Image (tube, helix red, strand yellow):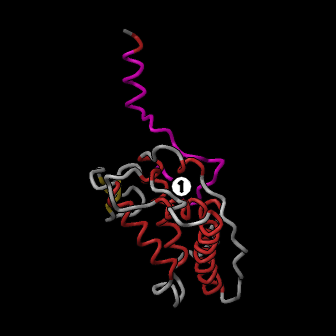
Amino acid sequence: MRALPVPQDVVDLLVTAILISSTDITQSPARVPIVASGRSPAAVLADADRLGQQLWDENYASVSFANRCSVPAPRYEWRPVAEFLGDRIDTEQILQIERCRLYMEEVSCHHAGWDDSEANRQLSRLEQSIEARLYFHPREASTQEPGVVEYVGLSRAVDEWTREIGFRSSLTVAAAAKALDVGDR
């Protein structure tokens, strides 16, 4: 059982992803308006802060349960992940969101209130959106968890994403070799 406090960058990534997520694969995730018609930016910020606080509260409830002491969650204030607010979100970014979602669930589910929590429901909705986006993405046997099948490339993503780490380039070794071959001609 791992019950660790999740860094704010991970919560920011998840909150931003939840706000732009949709299970409609015909719609680009970044084109889903965060500020919908009739909603003020202040209301959106308040909702984002509330959602992030719920995620952190559930995470810290697990940390408290695992350590048999009360560890209060810090006050959460949303800092959007700017890379998700552009024209598109690439597969590497979606894989990073999925890794962080799995990590948040793993380290937050160790207390009695998790199953019925709003945080769990929001992460489940995000999971559905990720599954829709990666429906045709290949899967492989996990290199870290025997018997688990996961999306190809998920093992490259990190549990505790930070803004300093950023997102992997979609350039692969095969793509680099191909680019070098084309350049030699």
Indicate whether residue 179 is drawn in magenta.
yes
Residue in the picture at 45% in, 34% down: 171
- Does residue 152 lie above or below 117 as drawn? above
Q: Quadrant of residue 13?
A: bottom right
Residue in the picture at 54% in, 77% down: 108
Residue 98: x and y, percent?
Answer: 45, 60
Q: What is the quadrant of the C terminus in the image?
A: top left
- For the magenta stretch, what is the residue range? 155-182
Rate crowding at label 1 as few (under 14), some (14 to 19) or many (20 or more) other CA atoms within 10 Å. Answer: some
From the image, tell me which residue sits under label 1. Answer: 158
Residue in the picture at 28% in, 56% down: 135
Q: Quadrant of residue 180?
A: top left
Indicate whether residue 81 is drawn in magenta.
no
Residue 133: x and y, percent?
Answer: 35, 55
Residue 137: x and y, percent?
Answer: 30, 50
The amino acid type found where label 1 is placed reads Val
Q: Say which of 86 and 154 sits in front.
A: 86
- Does residue 86 lie above or below 113 as drawn? above
Q: Say which of 109 and 128 sits in front.
A: 128
